[in-house]
Amino acid sequence: MLSERIVELIKEIYLDFRKGNFKEALVKSEEAHSLDFDNIEILTALKSSVYWNGQVESLDRIGQDYEKAEFLIREWNNFAGRYLKKMGCDFLQGRNSIKYFVFQTCLYIYKNIYKLHPENLDLLIKIAKSYKGMGNYEKAINVFLKILGNAKENSDVVAELADSYALVDEIKEAKVLFREAFFINPQKIDIYSLESDMILRLIDLIKSDRNISDDLIKEWIPVYGSLNGVFNVKRELRPIELGQLKQSVYSLRNELKEKSYRSINESILLPRLINKYFWLIDHYVRIKEDRARIDEILLYIKEIDLGIYQQYVN
C-alpha cells in the first residue's frame, strides 16, 4: 500500500505536469522514487519529468511562437507514440496531465496568431485539434463544424470531428462521419491522433491480423470497420457519387490485375477496392437491386481476399 506521502507527491506531480512545471515535478518525482524504488508509476513520472523538463528548456530557445507550438506537437507525438510505450505503465493520469499542458499552450499560441490571420483555415484546424487535445470535446466539435463548411473533402477534419463525437458518446454521428472520412481519403487521416475506443480497437485488430505499415492500416480501417459493425451507419449515394464510385472500382480492379500476389497484399489498392465494393453493395441493398448484382461483387471480393469474403458473408 502506498504511503500517504507518496500519494500526495503523485497528486502534486500530476498537477505540476498540467501546469507545465516540470522542474518542480522532477524534484517531487525524485523524492517519491527515493521512497519507493519499485513503483513503476513513480519511475514513469520521473522519466517523464526529465523528458519534458528538457523539452521546455528547448522551447525557450525557439524564437517564433508558431514554431514553439509545432515543436510541442511533434514532441507530444514522439512522447505518446514512442517514449511512453517503452515504459510498460498505463500512466493515464500523468499522460493526460502532460497532454493538457501541451495543447493548452498550443491553443493560446494558435488563437493569438489566428486573430491576425482569420482567413487561415489551417490555423483554425489546429485550434480545434488543440481543444480536443485538452479534452474540451464540445468546443472542438463546434470549431470542427465551423471548419467543415469549407473543408467537406478534408478527411482528417471529418475524422477528427467523428472522433470528438465518439468521445462525448454521440455514437451515431461518429459512425457515419468515420465511414465518410475513410471513404474520402484514408491517407490524409492522422490515425494516431484518434482517441475513441471504436477506432483504437480496429487498429489493434488489424495489427493482430496483418503485419503492415501505418499507411496500409489506414486503408484497412474502413474494411474492418464494416466487418465489425463500426461503419454501419450509412447514407444514400448521390447519382454523381455513384458514377464516381463505379469508375473508381473499375480503375482499381484493372490496376490490381496487373500486380503479383505478393505486391497485391502489400498494396493500398486491395483494401481500397474492397471498401469501395462494400459501399457499392450497401447502395444496391438500399435501392433493392437485383441479388445477382450483389453476388457478382461478392465473387470479386472472394477472388481478391478469401478471408475478408468469409468474414463478410458469415
Image (tube, rainbow, N blue to C red):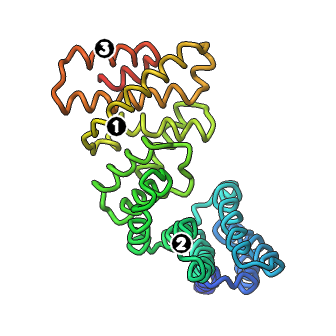
The kind of residue on which mark 3 rests is Glu
Q: What type is the residue that disc 2 sits on?
A: Glu
- Reading the image, the residue beneath label 2 is 119
- Judged from the image, the secondary structure of the residue bearing numbered disc 3 is helix
Q: Between 119 and 88, which is closer to the camera in this rendering?
A: 119
Residue at 73% x, 72% y: name it.
67
Dot placed on the residue nearer the N-terminal end, 3 or 1: 1
Residue 3 visible within the image: no
Label 2 residue SS? loop
- Circles 3 and 2, Cβ within 8 Å, touching? The answer is no
Q: Is residue 19 left or right of residue 245?
A: right
The image shows residue 253 at horizontal and vertical percentages of 47, 19
What's the residue at 45%, 54% (across, down)? 159
Q: Position of residue 288 (x, y in %)?
A: 15, 27
Residue 241 badge: 1
Image check: 100 left or right of 31?
left
The local secondary structure at tag 1 comes to helix
Residue under pointer 3: 296
Asked if residue 56 shows in the view, the reply is yes
Residue 276 sits in quarter: top left
Q: Percent x, y for residue 308?
A: 41, 24
Q: Is residue 299 above or below residue 34?
A: above
Of badges 3 and 2, the one in the foreground is: 2
> Mark 1 or mark 2, which is nearer the start of the sequence?
2
